Amino acid sequence: MPERFLIQGGRPLRGDVTVSGSKNAALYAVAAVLLTADPITLRNVPRIADIHEMAEILRAVGTHVEVEADGETIHFHTPEITSVVPPAELVTKLRASFLVMGALLGRAREAECPPPGGDVIGSRPLDVHFVGFRALGATVQRRGSSFHVQAARLRGGRVFFDYPSVLGTVNVMFAAVLAEGVTTIVNAAPEPEVEMAADMLVAMGARIRGQGTPTIEIEGVPTLHGADFSIIPDRLEAGTYLLAGCATHGDVRVTNAIPHHLDSLTAKMREMGVTVTEDASGGIRAVADRVLQATQVQAVPYPGFATDLHPPMAAALTQAAGVSLVHERVYDNRTLYVNELRKLGARIIIGGDSVIIEGPSALSGSTVRALDIRAGAAVVVAALAAEGETVIQDIGHLDRGYADLQARLTALGAEIRRV
């Protein structure tokens, strides 16, 4: 029988928790190691399944990968690219796998990949990636079920994105760092994970300005060198634990959160009546010791409210008095969690691109599924707030995004078992 979580809910979460390195930022960093023939060491890498999948893709194209005993320090070395066609069966498992296109194009001037896999949370067109590659002088062709990109020479160009695609920004940045001349990305994604990827490239010898803003300028260099680099804390994991504390009327402090990365979340938690404080050392504490109030949320690109925090926020809002609304403006299939929360007794419906929640709901344990990483976070948050036992199936999705979830929740006072 597949593994499941059993959660006995109704207990306030209290205490301190330290989150892992950012899942998304680490995936971008792992792809970036392809851009140099020198060794790279990454630290504070989250111990999650997606990282292992990405490492397998790199091994298939020539990277030597060594994981230290702590599981959070990984050494990479790609002395030569042995293949520009990573195995389709690996690429199609993981959305971030498509970043090997930009890295291989930058280093080897050629790459071929099928469309990436990952969670089924809506359409994510690849056109923005190809617009950027073509602006640098590459040709893009469809070969059966895969895309082939190639360039005899890469030259800097001006790239305008119709929307601030995170993966598109990173992919074009990877190709541009080894191109001739200057590349300017207009309407670039300003997410902290994108900024960190650029900072890592700078540590490898790239010349990049404007990361963390909507306009990024990249001056190409002939080669990149090795680096020793640490991954930033995961703002989405931090947000999930803070929301779990809110939903259970608890008191949770994330000791290593970066406060400005979570401004959009903490503003909404304050609207709900949660007392939020930021430590001088950088942590965030959320105390939910009063009746939670309904609020309205719009999931939009950074620095707006993160779409990946939409599902756990909706779960927390089931415990808020009044009618709350969460409007999704990033993905068109983000609401897979709604029917699972209804199984627990949530009064929640979908209206167009919005989710409408009436609370507070007296949630009761049931059997639910983690339908994707963040839908899984939603059912965990709701299960912690529910009375009785909840069985969560398909927890492999949670393993992809949350390292040591059981241990961390247990340390906060939750009763959770993996069976």
Image (cartoon, rainbow, N blue to C red):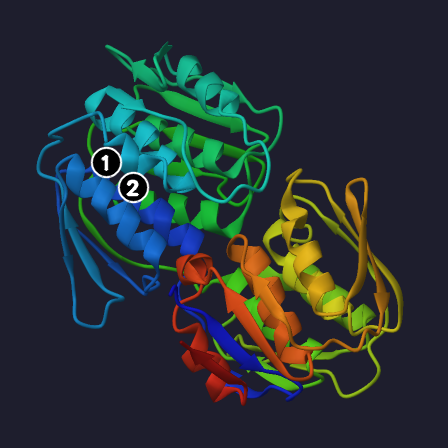
Q: Is residue 168 above or below residue 378?
A: above
Disc 2, SS: helix
Disc 1, SS: helix
The residue that mark 2 highlights is 32
Quadrant of image for the C terminus:
bottom left
Q: Residue at x 40, y 33 (%)?
A: 116
Q: Residue at x 24, y 67 (%)?
A: 71
The three-letter amino acid code for the residue at tag 2 is Ala
- Residue 93 place in picture, x, y as percent: 36, 41
- Residue 261 place in picture, x, y as percent: 58, 60
Count neighbours of disc 1 (C-alpha within 10 A) and say few if under 14, some if 14 to 19, many if 20 or more: many
| Distance between mark 1 and mark 2 Cα atoms | 6 Å
Q: Residue at x 46, y 24 (%)?
A: 129
- Residue 313 place in picture, x, y as percent: 69, 63
Q: Quadrant of residue 133?
A: top left
Q: Is residue 194 left or right of residue 230?
A: right
Circle 1/circle 2 CB separation < 8 Å: yes
Q: Residue at x 41, y 27 (%)?
A: 115
Do we see residue 334 in this rendering? yes
Q: Quadrant of residue 345?
A: bottom right
Q: Is residue 34 above or below residue 10?
A: above
Q: Is residue 265 left or right of residue 295?
A: left
Quadrant of image for the N terminus:
bottom left
Which residue lies most toward the right here? 322
Which residue lies most toward the left here? 79
The three-letter amino acid code for the residue at tag 1 is Leu
Q: Is residue 30 left or right of residue 80?
A: right
The disc label shown at residue 35, or none:
1
